[in-house]
Amino acid sequence: MTATTARRNEKEELVSVLISDLNKNLFVRQELDQNHVLYLAELIEAGVVLNPIEITPDMAVIDGRHRIEAAELNSQVEIKARIVSISDESELVARAYRANVGGALPPTQEDTEHTVLLLLDRGVAKKRIGELLGLPASLARKYVNEVQFKLKRQHLQRAVLAVTEGGLTVAKAAEQYAVEPAQLKEALSGKKKKWGISEIKLALSNQYRASSKRNSSICKKMIEKF
């Protein structure tokens, strides 16, 4: 079934679509969990019928990238899909996130930050992000603040490189990467910034999470080798 045929049948609840016609994206997850893909592929091979994926009328994938990969591993060329009408790309990102929250592989913290970044890039207001993703206001603010903090740090680092290695002036680099000239000068001078309480808490929190992940990874490897 082609994309044109799928559009004609968009009022139907379920359709069969060619996997090659699907428009895959990086919403919610930057990369797939290959172990989960293999697990789903084994279920398909054993005859288990998985839930249909969700797509827009123009064949953009909303939910089901792991199922699509699993179907391809089983040499399937078609897959069952439910067509859902979406008003804009921000709603598409948000629906993809909500669909994964209640699934077998919920979004990680990195997935959530990635989704928040996508919405910020699309001009979605901070207050609206929590509503779109179905997150409590306090948790949504936490994610938005962390993403914005990381973005500012990345922009500052790029501005520094633009001056030291790219030959730009401080004023030009500050304008290009949307950073304060005073902050850029401070970074270039090598002076340490005085952190506030909120920044210290954020840095400690990120450090704790990174340490926890490393310990978890080490324990997992030890158990596997044992």
Image: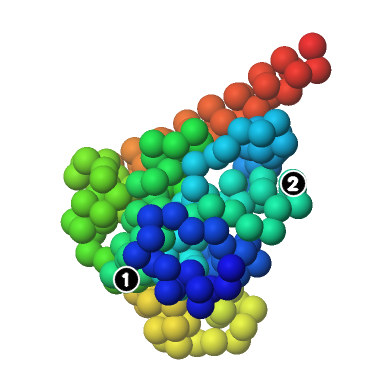
- Number of residues whose C-alpha sits closer than 10 Å to that of mark 2, classed few (under 14), some (14–19) or many (20 or more): few
Spatial CA distance of label 2 from label 1 is: 33 Å
Mark 2 vs mark 1: give the one in front.
Answer: 2
Give the residue type at disc 2.
Asn
Tell me residue 217's x, y (percent): 65, 27
Q: Is residue 190 above or below residue 176?
A: above
What mark, if any, has residue 129 been given in the picture?
A: none
Q: Is residue 100 above or below residue 127?
A: above
- Which is more toward the observer, 16 or 158? 16
> Dot 2: what SS?
loop
Residue sitting at 30 percent across and 50 percent down? Answer: 133
Which quadrant, please, contains the N terminus? bottom right
- Which is more toward the observer, 32 or 223? 32
Q: Is residue 197 above or below residue 126?
A: above
- Residue wearing tag 2: 74
Residue sitting at 79 percent across and 11 percent down? Answer: 226
Q: Quadrant of residue 219?
A: top right
- Taking the image as shown, residue 144 lies to the left or right of residue 54, namely left
- Residue wearing tag 1: 88
Tell me residue 216's x, y (percent): 60, 24
> Dot 1: what SS?
loop
Residue sitting at 39 percent across and 40 percent down? Answer: 101
- Taking the image as shown, residue 73 lies to the left or right of residue 176, namely right
